[in-house]
Structures are given as structure tokens and as C-alpha cells.
């Protein structure tokens, strides 16, 4: 059974690399990907890799991004997180949870006319830094907030 | 077929405030059942919100969005009586679309 698990992991890994190559070639900035799903980005296991999979080379800290979330979440299965960007021409907002099995939780494309604000609920496996990644005018910015988790929300 | 979404779309000033509660298990694929077998992942991957033929929000989600997902956002250009449509698509190809009428502020 363990052997099977390894195979699955390997297969998943190589598919991820292929998808990553496709993304690097095709997606210049935060262009809308209607009904497509960026598998490479959702497979990443670090903040830096997620930024790359979303088409950036890195991101700069910004005081113009506000994360509204509790300091301590009693239940990691339901952690309310809201992100508001005051950066001009905000195109996309992503929520990244550093210590989850997969870093990227959600990515929102913000068309002109929609407020650069989203609020949702996420699962957190353990206490972690939560990053709000914002793509604005083709550039990548982030804010960080640590959320302490009393009971993890990803295990059995 | 998944249960209907619960949608509230209200005018606040010149913006439409949209709050949605979707019914979905959002299974991560990392959990095991009582006999130790992995429970396959089952989660919403794409969410699209449209108003008057225009997309006002599109999202891609992973497995770490909470069970029965909640979404809240605001957009300009809507009026009371007009419709907002929300559609999701999950990793098994199941989908659901619901609409709500924008209520006055």
C-alpha cells in the first residue's frame, strides 16, 4: 500500500512539473483563467513556489493589504479570513497558508468594477502564517498574519 | 445533485454586497475512513459569479477552503431587481448554479 502511495506521489509530481511549464509559457500576469484550474499552483508546498506557479518571480511586502482574521482560531476547520487590497489596479487576491499540506488555498480574480476585497473560510492544519498575495498592475505584493490554531482542521 | 446555495445580494451604497453559502463537503483527500482507507478528494475548484452577462468574480479553490464554503465580496454596477448568478464546478465534474435577485439597500 505504501508502494502505491509513492507511485501516486511521483505521478502527481511529474504532472505538476508539466503543468508548471505550461503556465510559465502561457500565463503572463494574472490573466483570468475562466473554468481552468491551476493544478501546479494548488500542488505547491511553499509560499515562494506558489508565487512562481501563479506567474510571479517574487513578491514585496505591502502595508496596503489588510488581512482580517482571528489571532487564535479554536477550530482549524473553519477559519474566517478576509483580504482587502488598497493597491491600485488589483487584479487578483490569493490566500496562502504556509504550513498546510498544500500552501495555496484560494485564488480570486478581481475584474474592474469589483472591490479588491474577498472574505471566505479556510482550513488550517496547525498554527501558521497566512499570506495574502495580491497581483496589482502586474506586480506581486503580500501581507502576512500569524493565526494560532488550537485544533487542526485537515487531519482525521 | 448538491443542495442549493444560499445567496444574499443587497445594495450598500452604489455597490452590491454578495454573501454566498454553498453546500459542499470539500473533502481534502488526506483523511481516512474508519477502516483506514483514504477518502478521495472532492472539492469545488471553480467559482464564477456573473451579473448582466459580465463576470464580477472568478475563483479557483483548493482543498483547504472550508466545508460548506462561504464567500463574501462587493461589486459596482448592479441595481435592485437585477440578478446575480453564482456557479461552481468541482473536481468530479459536478456543478451547480443558483441566482439571486439584488435587494434594495
Image (cartoon, coloured by chain):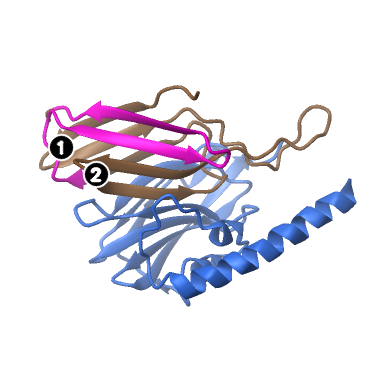
The N terminus of chain A is located in which quarter?
top right
The C terminus of chain A is located in which quarter?
top right
Q: Position of residue A38 (x, y in %)?
A: 51, 58
What residue is at 19 percent from the left and 41 percent from the top?
B52
Which residue bears the numbered disc 2? B74
Residue interval drawn in magenta: B75-103
Circles 2 and 1, Cβ within 8 Å, touching? The answer is: yes
Q: Neighbour class for label 2 at 10 Å: few (<14), some, many (≥20)?
A: many
What colour do you see for chain A? blue
What residue is at 40 percent from the left and 49 percent from the top?
B59
Q: Would residue B23 appear left or right of A109 to someone viewing this image?
A: right
In the figure, A64 relative to A152: above or below? below
Of the pair B82 and A83, the residue shown nearer to us: B82
Q: Position of residue A107 (x, y in %)?
A: 43, 54
Q: Would residue B61 appear left or right of A86 to someone viewing this image?
A: right
> Residue A108, labelled with which disc?
none
Q: Neighbour class for label 1 at 10 Å: few (<14), some, many (≥20)?
A: few
Which residue bears the numbered disc 1? B12
What residue is at 36 percent from the left and 43 percent from the top?
B48
Amino acid at each position: 500500500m505504501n508502494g502505491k502511495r509513492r507511485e501516486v506521489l511521483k505521478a502527481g509530481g511529474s504532472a505538476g512539473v508539466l503543468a508548471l511549464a505550461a503556465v510559465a509559457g502561457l500565463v503572463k500576469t494574472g490573466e483570468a483563467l475562466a473554468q481552468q484550474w491551476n493544478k501546479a499552483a494548488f500542488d505547491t508546498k511553499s509560499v515562494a513556489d506558489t508565487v512562481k506557479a501563479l506567474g510571479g518571480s517574487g513578491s514585496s511586502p505591502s502595508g496596503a493589504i489588510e488581512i482580517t482574521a482571528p489571532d487564535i482560531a479554536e477550530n482549524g476547520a473553519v477559519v474566517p479570513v478576509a483580504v482587502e487590497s488598497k493597491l491600485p489596479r488589483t487584479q487578483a487576491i490569493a490566500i496562502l497558508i504556509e504550513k498546510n499540506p498544500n500552501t495555496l488555498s484560494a485564488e480570486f480574480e478581481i475584474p474592474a468594477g469589483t472591490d479588491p476585497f474577498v472574505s471566505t473560510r479556510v482550513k488550517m492544519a496547525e498554527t501558521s502564517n497566512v499570506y495574502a498575495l495580491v497581483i496589482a498592475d502586474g506586480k506581486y505584493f503580500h501581507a502576512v498574519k500569524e493565526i494560532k490554531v488550537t485544533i487542526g482542521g485537515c487531519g482525521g | 445533485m448538491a443542495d442549493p446555495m444560499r445567496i444574499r445580494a443587497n445594495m450598500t451604497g452604489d455597490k452590491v454586497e454578495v454573501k454566498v453559502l454553498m453546500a459542499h463537503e470539500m473533502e481534502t483527500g488526506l483523511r481516512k475512513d474508519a477502516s483506514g482507507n483514504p477518502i478521495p478528494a472532492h472539492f469545488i475548484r471553480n467559482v464564477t459569479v456573473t451579473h448582466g452577462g459580465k463576470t464580477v468574480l472568478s475563483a479557483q479553490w483548493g482543498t483547504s477552503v472550508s466545508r460548506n464554503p462561504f464567500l463574501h465580496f462587493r461589486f459596482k454596477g448592479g441595481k435592485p431587481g437585477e440578478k446575480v448568478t453564482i456557479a461552481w464546478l468541482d473536481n468530479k465534474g459536478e456543478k451547480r448554479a443558483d441566482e439571486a435577485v439584488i435587494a434594495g439597500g
